[in-house]
């Protein structure tokens, strides 16, 4: 029984995000670099991903015992593939079934596994650290609120969000899908209302300014307990 059917049986209505994201890849709404699956410039432009990979490799290698990492919204895995070697186990999760099937065939490492899950309705694998790189920014406030309680099972959460430059009103609601809050001059802040997510420590480790005033991509590491 798949996760969607299980959730319906348990009285939980699945979100429409699964179909929306499948359409994004099928219609190449995030661009087309002539590959079967493409997670957009945010997963491929060197000026964006190289500093991120460096920051995450530094974080992951700072532990005496390697962490079990859950990459929630792993996409085409162009970024995650550079992090696997620095973990005890790396679990790539995405909502698009065909994408996960593709990743299973393309990336084969002993400590790597992939699962197709809707993180808003499914139970998450256990681990030490959850990575959400430009994932929550595509989701409605209600869907985010269904995800955040599950993150409390991880000691660390690495969150990357595309935000407006300068001051902005956070967490304006959107419909889940291709777009983000930037079009509303807003961005996600899980510590602010209506989420009020509780953490023990937060550390902003990376800010990448985009050209033409298209905002900034900010990566923050939260320690939850």
Image (tube, grey):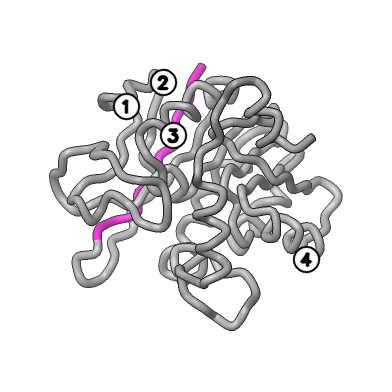
Main secondary structure of the magenta stretch? strand
Residue denoted by label 1? 191
Residue 158 part of the magenta-drawn span? no
Tag shown at residue 148: none
Return the disc, 4 or 1, that comes first in the chain's sequence. Answer: 4
**From the viewer's perspective, is 217 left or right of 46?**
left
User: 18 or 39, which is in the foreground?
Assistant: 18
Q: Residues within 10 Å of mark 2 (few under 14, many from 20)?
A: some
2 vs 4, front mark: 4
Q: Is residue 123 visible?
A: no
Give the spatial CA distance, label 4 vs label 1. 37 Å
**From the viewer's perspective, is 155 left or right of 170?**
right
**From the viewer's perspective, is 55 left or right of 161?**
right
Residue denoted by label 3? 143
Rendering quarter of residue 201: top left
Magenta-highlighted residues: 215-225
Return the disc, 1 or 3, that comes first in the chain's sequence. Answer: 3
Q: Residues within 10 Å of mark 4 (few under 14, many from 20)?
A: few
2 vs 3, front mark: 3
Give the spatial CA distance, label 4 vs label 3. 30 Å
Residue denoted by label 2? 199
Residue denoted by label 4? 106
Rendering quarter of residue 103: bottom right
Return the disc, 4 or 3, that comes first in the chain's sequence. Answer: 4
Q: Are marks 1 and 2 in contact (CB under 8 Å)?
A: yes
Give the spatial CA distance, label 1 vs label 2. 8 Å
4 vs 3, front mark: 3
């Amino acid at each position: 029984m798949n996760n969607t059917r299980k959730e319906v049986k348990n009285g939980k209505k699945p979100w429409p995000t699964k179909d929306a994201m499948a359409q994004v890849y099928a219609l190449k709404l995030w661009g087309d670099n002539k590959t079967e699956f493409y997670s957009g410039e945010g997963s491929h432009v060197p000026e964006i991903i190289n500093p991120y990979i460096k920051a995450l490799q530094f974080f992951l290698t700072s532990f005496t015992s390697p962490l079990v990492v859950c990459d929630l919204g792993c996409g085409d895995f162009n970024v995650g593939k550079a992090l696997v070697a620095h973990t005890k186990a790396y679990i790539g999760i995405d909502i698009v079934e065909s994408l996960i099937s593709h990743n299973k065939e393309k990336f084969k490492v002993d400590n790597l596994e992939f699962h197709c899950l809707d993180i808003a309705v499914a139970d998450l694998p256990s681990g030490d650290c959850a990575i959400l790189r430009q994932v929550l920014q595509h989701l409605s406030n209600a869907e985010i609120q269904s995800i955040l309680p599950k993150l409390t099972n991880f000691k660390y959460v690495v969150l990357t969000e595309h935000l407006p430059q300068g001051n902005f009103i956070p967490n304006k609601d959107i419909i889940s899908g291709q777009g983000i809050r930037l079009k509303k001059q807003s961005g996600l802040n899980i510590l602010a209302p209506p989420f009020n997510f509780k953490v023990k420590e937060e550390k902003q480790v990376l800010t990448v300014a985009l050209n033409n005033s298209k905002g900034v991509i900010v990566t923050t590491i939260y320690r939850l307990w």
